[in-house]
Image (spheres, rainbow, N blue to C red):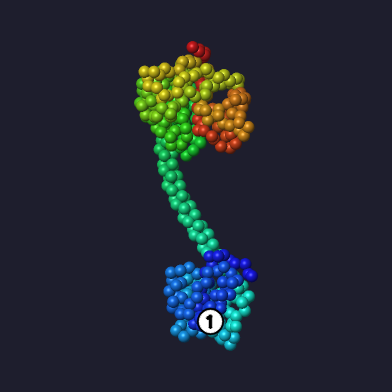
Amino acid sequence: MLESSGIDAVVVLVDDEPMVTRSLAAVLNLETDYQVETFQNPQEALEFLASNRADVVVSDFMMPEMNGLEFLAGVRDLDPDLPRVMLTGYADKENAIRAINEVGLFQYLEKPLDNDLLMLTLHNAINRRSLQATLKNKIHELDLTLRQKDELKSRDQEMQAELDWARTVQEKFLPEEMPALAGWELQVVYRPAMAVGGDFYDFVPLSGGRWAIVVADSTGHGVQAALGTALLKFATGSLVGQDLGPREIMAALNQVMHKGLPRDIPVAASVAVLDPDSGEVRLVGGGLPKAMLMHGDALVKELPVTGLLLGLVDNSMYTPGKELELALEPGQRLLLFSDGLTEAQNDEDEFFGEGPLQKLAEKMGDISGAELVENLATAALDFGLAKYRDDLTLVTIERTGSQPMENEK
């Protein structure tokens, strides 16, 4: 007994001789578990096939109302993939060849039939039908996947266009150029981890020729963090020309952040107020890593400036951090940076700020400010396995002209 292709396989037998269809059906019912449908009238068989599934059709050629060629042509029109088998007499090979050419026979069988050959033919035809159905399903799934991919690609392109727009807008929040201050060099490196970042820096002209240097880091990444940078730009823009110290600037920034941001998106910041004429720098921290004072002899000193994050409470409860005052000497530089530098992490869960940063900075005392910030940003990137986990901003304030003494309070 030939192994069945499945109990759901449907075989349609069409012959105008009832004895032929009965005998074939009896053999199939005995030898297989196929569902067998028999017809003496080809038109009735076509009506059945129009509304029912079949896996193979076997038809005699010589029938009075409709011959096998006409019937199988109708079957092909209903379902081009349905395997079609024609029964012919020994001397009727010419019609068999016509059927192969005209209606695309799967096979023709000569009468009298060899039952084993019939079983093998039906088995192969049903298997092909099953494989064709599987292939069609796979092609349909592939088409669906490709369409979904195209839709995702289209949405991704739309999102990318929006992010490009957001990045362009955000870049306008940042200064287009460094202030040109005689006797001073200011340098910046800004590296967002995503298309839009949460870090921010600004150089704000105050009264009396002084400048406020603001470095900030909004919690989170991407669009959420970028909202904080928009508010920071609004806040720093309102400070232009005012007679403010760093603690007052911190309070002003806090009030805007508290009103404009949810409590779970606080902002860390550092504010330095520089008097280019006297060389005095007044510094206040608010959650960013400690600033570094770098000397020409390559010694490095962390500055103890700390304070509360911005935006958590309103100004009735907010107290800015303690102010540190110093006078930069020629060859000294102040380095402000976000935690994207210190928290660069390698595959051993070590942080760049836990040792590598200070060791590297101690070897950079004689290079320019531009080289310093670029070298540190590159070192953090290399340490962090060639990717920034967080936005990174570095700002250097270097005294290149002459002025004396340092006075810390």
The answer to whether residue 112 is seen in the rendering is yes
Q: Is residue 234 left or right of residue 336?
A: left
Q: Quadrant of the N terminus?
A: bottom right
Q: Nearer the viewer, residue 185 or 273?
A: 273
For this orientation, the residue located farthest to the bottom is: 91
Q: Which residue is mark 1?
A: 19
Q: Is residue 104 above or below residue 275?
A: below
Point out residue 246 in the picture as x, y percentages from the top left corner: 42, 19
Q: Is residue 296 above or below residue 162?
A: above
Point out residue 64 in the picture as x, y percentages from the top left corner: 46, 85
Q: Is residue 379 above or below residue 296?
A: below
Q: Nearer the viewer, residue 28 or 168?
A: 28
| Secondary structure under the numbered disc 1 in the rendered image | helix
Point out residue 299 in the picture as x, y percentages from the top left corner: 60, 20
Residue at point 54% right, 35% down?
A: 388
Point out residue 156 in the picture as x, y percentages from the top left corner: 45, 47
Image mark count: 1
Residue at point 48% right, 56% down?
A: 144
- Label 1, residues with CA under 10 Å away: few <14, some 14-19, many ≥20: few
Q: Nearer the viewer, residue 342 or 127?
A: 127
Amino acid type, callout 1: Met
